[in-house]
């Protein structure tokens, strides 16, 4: 008859189902799987697209600010000067 001591000795010598499952889990963590790489690529793609969208919005806002604060006052001043010149000078046509 097999005793508990015999079972303990057998467990030390032979691999158990639990040992194999633990080994498989360690291997899965150690090496990248195809699905893991695909998921990482998907996440990276989403992160890049989000970053690009945010950067695009920042660029658009920056350009709008330059136009609003820098170019529009210059154009308004220029148009005012042209209007004053047109009033002073007779029409050339």
Image (cartoon, helix red, strand yellow):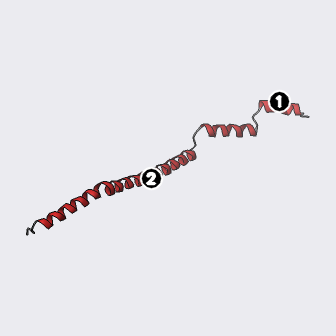
**Identity of the residue drawn at 12% across and 65% down:** 88
**Identity of the residue drawn at 80% across and 33% down:** 11
Dot 2 crowding, Cα within 10 Å, few <14, some 14–19, many 20+:
few
Quadrant in the picture for residue 65: bottom left
Tag nearer the camera, 2 or 1: 2
Q: CA distance from mark 2 to mark 1?
A: 63 Å
Q: Residue furthest right?
A: 1
Q: Residue furthest left?
A: 93
Quadrant of the frame with the N terminus: top right
Q: Secondary structure at mark 1?
A: helix
Q: Secondary structure at mark 2?
A: helix
Quadrant of the frame with the C terminus: bottom left
Q: Position of residue 43 (x, y in %)?
A: 53, 49
Quadrant in the picture for residue 69: bottom left
* Left-right relation of 20 to 52: right
Q: Is residue 84 above or below residue 63?
A: below
Picture disc at residue 9: 1
Picture disc at residue 54: 2
Q: How many marks?
A: 2
Quadrant in the picture for residue 30: top right
Dot 1 crowding, Cα within 10 Å, few <14, some 14–19, many 20+:
few
Comparing 85 with 44, the one in front is 85
- Mark 2 or mark 1: which comes first in sequence? 1
Q: Position of residue 89 (x, y in %)?
A: 10, 65
Q: Is residue 90 above or below residue 57?
A: below
């Amino acid at each position: 008859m097999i005793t508990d001591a015999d079972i303990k000795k057998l467990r030390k010598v032979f691999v158990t189902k639990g040992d194999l499952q633990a080994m498989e889990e360690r291997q899965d963590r150690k090496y990248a799987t195809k699905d893991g790489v695909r998921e990482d690529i998907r996440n990276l793609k989403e992160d890049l697209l989000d970053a690009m969208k945010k950067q695009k919005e920042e660029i658009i806002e920056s350009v709008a600010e330059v136009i609003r604060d820098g170019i529009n006052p210059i154009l308004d001043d220029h148009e005012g000067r042209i209007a004053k010149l047109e009033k002073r000078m007779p029409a050339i046509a």
